[in-house]
Amino acid sequence: MPASPSPSADALVIIPTYNEADNIGVAIDTVMRLDVPIHVLVVDDNSEDGTAGVVRQKMEAHPRRIRLIERAGKLGLGTAYLRGFRYALAEDFTTICEMDADLSHDPADLPRLIEPVRSGEADLAIGSRYVGGVRVIDWPLPRLVLSYSAGIYTRAITRMPIKDVTAGFKCFHRRVLETVDLGRVNSNGYAFQVEMHYRTWRAGFQIVEVPVIFTERTEGQSKMSRDIVREAAWKVWELRLRDLAGKL
């Protein structure tokens, strides 16, 4: 197990993985080269393609900055992030980021997400595909329409003032994760992102959207499925109704 972070290196990025051997090494290398010292936590769901082995190789070069949690099965995005959040809080990280492993999120944008949180401008900085215009590369039109429409649908029901409601590239201040009852977060997939945004907003935290460019993966397979879309569609109603009933 690597040593605990030094006080000056208080940023962590959590990267959930399932069969991302073609991408995770590049993602980690890019983070390691950044001027801002950022630690990496990979939460791997028993990948069959050697993803964990790639991470272990990177750990040999950066033993103090890379950590790997291997889980017994494909347990889902939401539980992977919750596991990562609890690790981050236990290890006293101040700024805690989420990032996909497939390079659709540019790791070089991490300092731009960390800065408003570290400076006190925001409690949550979201890497937004839709603030100030659409910044998505190589998505087929039906998927772009689905994503954009999902934002309109979610904002109409929840009233959240967030353009990119399903964004998975972001940075929290630890006080958000200490305040939000993580034990009550029960979503997976894109619904997890919606739920975390909603709970953060309803708790009164300051949220900013930072424009980023989202690029469709070139290696590996997308984890999008109809079940993920259905969960997200229902979750917004559940969140709103539970909130109105005082049971959020």
Image: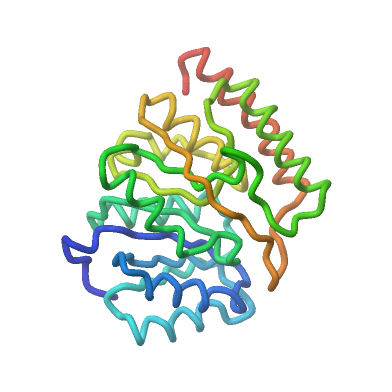
Give the residue drawn at x 41%, y 71%. 68
For the point 22% across and 54% down, the residue is 92
Residue 247 location (% of width, % of height): 47, 19
Q: Position of residue 110 (x, y in %)?
A: 42, 58
Quadrant the N terminus occupies: bottom left
Say if 139 sits above or below 116 in the image.
below
Residue 239 lies, in percent from the top left, at: 56, 25
- Left or right of 3, for residue 85: right
Q: Quadrant of residue 148?
A: top right
How many numbered badges does the structure rendering display? 0
Furthest residue to the front?
132
Q: How is the image coloured?
A: rainbow
> 227 or 134, which is in the foreground?
134
The answer to which quarter of the image holds residue 213 is: bottom right
Outermost left residue: 7
Question: Residue 207, relative to residue 37: is it above or below?
Answer: above
| In the image: residue 169, left or right of residue 65 | right
Tell me if 207 is positioned left or right of 238 in this view. Answer: left
Residue at (27% x, 47% y) in the render: 118
Q: Residue furthest top?
A: 245
Task: Residue 24 in the image: state x and y as whole percent.
Answer: 53, 74
Q: Is residue 203 above or below residue 27?
A: above
User: Which residue does the image show at 43% across and 82% down from the upper left?
Assistant: 56
Q: Depth check: give the residue in front, 50 or 60.
A: 60
